[in-house]
Amino acid sequence: MSDEQLKELCISLIQADTGTDVIDLLKKAGCWGRQEVWRFYGDYENNYSTIGTQQSRPDAALVEKLVNSVDARLMNECLMQDTLPESPAAPQSIREAVALFFESAQKPSSTHTGLIREWPDSMRTEIARGITLSATGATARDGSLCFSVSDCGEGQTPEAMPNTFLSLTETNKMRIPFVQGKFNMGGTGVLRFCGKHNLQLVVSRRNPDILKGKLSHPSDTQWGFTIIRREDPEGNRRSSVYTYLAPVGAENNHGKGGVLRFSAETMPIFPDGRNAYSRTSAWGTLIKLYEYSATGYRSHILRKDGILGRIDLLLPDIALPMRLHECRSSYRGHEGSFETTLTGIKVRLEDDKAENIEHGFPDSSPINVMGEEMTVTIYAFKKGRADTYRKNEGIIFVVNGQTHGYLTQDFFTRKKAGSFSYLADSLLVVVDCSGLSGRAREDFFMNSRDRLSGGELRIEIERALEELLKNHSGLRELKERRRREEIAAKLDDSKPLEDILESLLKHSPTLSALFLQGKRISTPFKTLQAQTKEGPYEGKKFPTYFKFRGKNYGVELHRECHINMRCRIIFETDAANDYFSRDVDRGEFRLTMIKGGAEASVPVRNYILNLQNGIASLSFNLPEDACTSEELHLLSIVSDASRIAPFENRFTIKVTEAAKPSEGSSTRRKPPSDKEGQEREMPSGIQMPNIRLVDEADWPNRTPPFDQYTALRIKHAGQQDPNDGNGDAPDIYDFFINMDNLYLKSELKAGGKEDPEVIRARFKYGLVLVGLALLQQDAQNKKRSGGDNDEEPEENGHKENIESRVEAVSKALAPIIVPMIDSLGALDLEGSLPKDGSGEAT
């Protein structure tokens, strides 16, 4: 084929939007059916075993392509300055590279932070034009959605493409400190989602200014392009294999030919408005994913609940902005609604903080787990605002601005995490893991960078997060306020329901023994007078003090701690809540144990520091070799860019005997006495619930919304402190009953002469008893297992908790609960129902 014919083929492949169109073009060019011109991806016939185990979700796989484009742009700028990327002269972090390569030119007289949020909109938009994501094809219904990722990065020569874009095990970026990609395989994750034939187009040209006329091959200045496809198992080959089109010189190179190539000064690889391929570039790369299976995200890509919102979450602190274009003609809209700049969720939250985030948040906490340092940032959204930013993600773990794994919102409902059922739909926790050692990162994340691994480190990190959330004063106060808003007005209305329920239970000795050990809770909220005294906290960027609470600075603190408990120390300060987590001028915290003098200090490997509204709560584990009566000497150090001398606080911990059962909830209760009589220990019981009736008008206000099949939903509201110090504190639950349930309405319609209020009462109290029974069973199971583990076995990848179980069981029982109560109550001794006047059984 001539140079011009190859260019026309390349442009036709760029513009094709279905796999069928691609195959027809290659058949016409005489390439599709010629096996000898297709080369194994990575020069490895068994490559499916590697490529097929990458990202499990199409959105995470797509993000890898965008990350590669960011890396390419940073590499381009570094090479343009004649700096070897692996050398000490190159930037040593992604943020340093952004500041040096982009901010120094755009903002020469300003402080360079490398943070997108510090850039004006005009600068964000201009730099974003260098990385674009465009959607083409038809609507989602016919499955022909295509994505094109374009960038003006370094680009590759045709001869280099087999060792870069089309390789699997090369160490191209392993030793470059300012890029994200390391494993040289993450970009292959998209292939499994590219339609029936798994087709992908790669077009690239090396930046001529990098080559500077020094050519290693005559084709170095040309554009190279190829198609990647998946070939099904056949013959003795038991698995699929990925190959790419490489006909150049294939006949003389044992099946290892080169990619197609042609000469052209520029190519239309970038979108302009709604035209996907109209803005030209003299170099760069275009990757096209045909018939991409973005299930759930096939709508207008700029919708916040579409692919834009997903990329925002998966790249929460992306190094460079990028531009998204909706180019499908099937979508209509007002002018300007078809392209936007993507900056990551952290920038969006900063820009829209006043409208979306509760006062006092985001809040930051440094944690140290097994010697690995991380920073935890807690976002508490205003009610109803979180769904714009995330779906079911509760805690996301981020490395260099990219989400590598997450835990779902169910984490917040764990008792060990504080039972934040009232806040689970309003929280997002970001754990910055960029400081993890290489080994810890390998242990915690899968190589695919879209999910967490198992193992000891994950268990300990989850424990640390549970401890942090459970003891977070700001979250406890917000939970109290949300609960007050939701049910306080209904407490008096629910009192008659509880009186009837209590009377019903007392008439049954069995039910009484099970459920009536707890007392009715008094109002769980602060008084209005106490609430009004609390004003908004405004901290300082750099604190002027950081000392033990209630002590003068410099006074040593002495505390005791049980050997089987975590030690807690409270500081007070005037630092802002983001003091330990902000990206610029961040405060640093260190905790060391002093052994044999100040010169022999050992870093404490497991601690949590939570800073909220002027109170810093430190919690840490005692050393494993600690002994009773031993005195431990510790030093905490807080420093930042503004201080010549850090804040130093010394304290001594005297280790005491293990806490007895009544002193700590983590120890097992002693078995009941064998003696008969009233002294024998009885079950602790379930606290009488607060009952709220929900009608259809209120369905949308529930989270998630009620529907016609919902029957009963419960929310854990905390624990009431026991007054006598014996036994466990009873759990407090709020019960929400759907009084417009489909099956209840059917019973009311068919009730005949039965009083509707009686039918409603049977439905209400029947469901409450079912809920109480399930709660009691859950509590007894945990006691038998010797702990308070609120995680249930996984089923279909989902960890069920008691709240979801109650909702599922009550939904299943809703159709039969009223007929069952009616029928069983009317049975005679022979097990038959009474007859009506017609002689027929009723």
Image: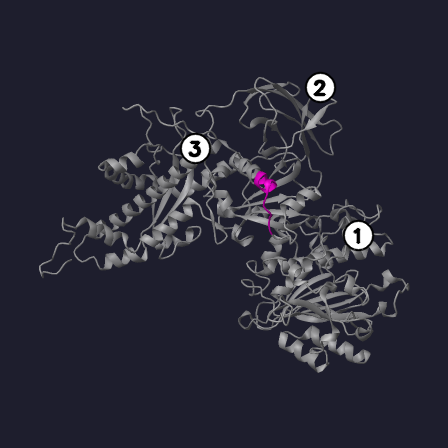
209 with respect to 529 (left or right): right
Q: Nearer the viewer, mark 3 or mark 1?
A: 1
Please say if 401 is above or below 73: above
Q: Which residue is mark 3?
A: 526
SS type, badge 1: helix
The C terminus is located in which quarter? bottom left
* Image height of 767 relative to 683, above or below: below
Distance from label 3 to label 2 (Cα)? Answer: 48 Å
Please identify the quarter of the rendering in which residue 573 is found: top right
Residue 157 x, y percent position in the rendering: 81, 65
Amino acid type, residue under disc 2 in the picture: Gly
Q: Which residue is labeled 1 in the image?
A: 101
The answer to whether residue 6 is left or right of residue 680 is right
Q: Which residues are magenta?
A: 451-461
Compare residues 280 and 839 and report the one nearer the observer: 839
Residue 362: x and y in percent read 59, 42
Q: Which mark is residue 304?
A: none
The residue at the far right in this view is 214
User: Which comes sooner in the sequence, label 3 or label 1?
Assistant: 1
Residue placed farthest to the bottom in the image? 28
Label 1 environment density (alpha carbons within 10 Å; few <14, some 14–19, many ≥20): many
> What residue would you read off at disc 2?
596
Say which of marks 2 and 1 sits in front. 2
Label 3 packing within 10 angstroms: few (<14), some (14-19), many (20+): few
Is residue 455 rendered magenta in the image?
A: yes
Q: Is residue 12 visible?
A: yes
Q: Could you say whether the residue bearing mark 2 is in a helix, strand or loop?
A: loop
Query: What colouring style does the render use?
Result: one colour
The disc, 2 or 1, on the residue closer to the chain's N-terminal end is 1
- Disc 2 to disc 1, how far (Cα)? 48 Å
Q: Amino acid at mark 1?
A: Phe
